[in-house]
Image (spheres, grey):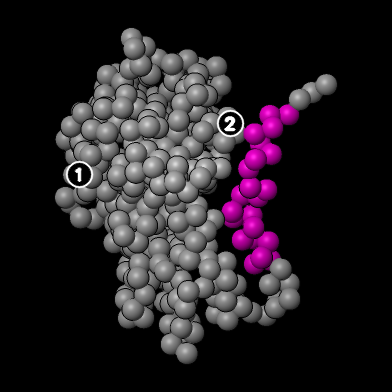
Amino acid sequence: MAKLNENFLTLEKNYLFIDIAKKVNSYKEKNPDKKIIRMGIGDVTLPLAPVVVDAFKKGCDEMGVKETFKGYEDSGSGYEFLKQAIANYYAKIDVKLELGEIRVNDGAKADCGNIVDIFSDDNIILLTDPVYPVYADSNKMAGRNIIYANSNEENGFAAMPSDISIADGEQSSKFKEFVAKNVAKIIKPSIIYLCSPNNPTGSVYTKEQLKLWVDYAIKNDAIIIFDAAYESFITEKHLPRSIFQIEGAKKCAIEMCSLSKTAGFTGVRCGYTVIPNDLKIGDVKIADIWARRQGSKFNGVSYPVQCAAAAVFTEIGLKQIHENISYYQQNAKIIANTLTKLDIKFTGGINSPYVWFKCPNNLSSWEFFDYLLTEAQVVGTPGAGFGKNGEGWFRLTAFGDKDLTIEAMEKIANLLAK
Ligand code: PLP
């Protein structure tokens, strides 16, 4: 008899955004003439940059000519022209990468989820809470033990090693207290996921904070999986855009990045993972094991998509994508300014397309979701969907249309001023 991986039964029934879509659709059915403004899901709305479209088309044209047609890519890890473009991009922030340290993929989500394949199931996983659900789900699917570092109002939603707590369990209060105090000594997490700028909270680690995480990982022989999907939204120059800007990180970190938000590739699909040659467990190079895994389960990214991705990193490409990014940043400012006027606490919005704020009047995240949907027809994302510390908080995204963002924020301001 076929047997199920029963770990799947431990997952939340639906992915968060499916629950949101159900609620919105049901409201829409009952109120067909109401205009709904969506600021929930983190999908982009602006089109690809012209130089990217040209390169995409040129790649397609080459596929239609016998002499330039491409089949399977030899390495499946990305064409050299794209890996060189990525390495040059990193060089601008003084991070030197070998081309063999970069692997191109069809978006960061797959690698974020699939990387669990190469690590043993008895690793202890450390996530920050609230968390991008993929890190938690992919480890739960493998039946791993997960512990959390608490991101909360006190630490500006940027959890540090000192904020590590234990996952829920059956323990006496005395034991819980003891463990809470000594958890870093008792339980040593071996795989640590960090996301900066953070989804959902918009917080960004400083270089000093990341150095503490790197030191912590090295001290505990742990590996950090650093998700830099929103690095291009960082405007304050002193903030790190890559973990490899931190001394020692090449010995303990893997970095994942995506062109989805950077260059509007959510429907095109392209990202990359960097595994430094220095990253090893014993004598084994992690990059070799990941290459072996990908060799068996992944056949590379299409040639036209890689042409489009390489165009992002050209001088003109970077200029054009930054026009889109600044458009979203202006939206974030509009959201943040409204919240400031309403005297509502929030994080994000400056170096991130996400604004994360405290639900007014002590409403729970889902209560506020319903209130906003029914009274202002604005859709956001309840913070509780990202973990227990998200309860009572709410996420709005800046990826929408500017006029609609203004309209939504006016509606929210009017509603909350009542
Ligand atoms: N990492 C984070 C933190 C994200 O928010 C997302 C998408 O929303 C991804 C990774 C995945 O991006 P993609 O698969 O589109 O490259």
Where residue 34 sits: x, y (%)? 64, 79
Q: In which quarter of the image is the N terminus?
A: top right
Q: Residue at x 43, y 16 (%)?
A: 289
Q: Viewed as shown, does residue 349 lie left or right of 113? A: left
- Give the residue at mark 2: 143
Where residue 107 sits: x, y (%)? 47, 38
Q: Residue at x 68, y 61 (%)?
A: 22
Q: Viewed as shown, does residue 300 lie left or right of 374? A: left
Q: Which residue is drawn at 18% across and 44% down?
A: 208
User: Rounded to the nearest whole Å, what is the CA distance between mark 1 and mark 2?
Assistant: 33 Å
Residue segment shown in magenta: 4-25
Q: In which quarter of the image is residue 148?
A: top left
Asked if 382 appears above or below 373 in the picture, the reply is above
Q: Viewed as shown, does residue 234 lie left or right of 378? A: left
Crowd band around label 1 with a 10 angstrom C-alpha radius: few (<14), some (14–19), many (20+):
some
Q: Is mark 1 on a helix, strand or loop?
A: helix
Where residue 61 sits: x, y (%)? 49, 34
Q: Residue at x 57, y 36 (%)?
A: 140
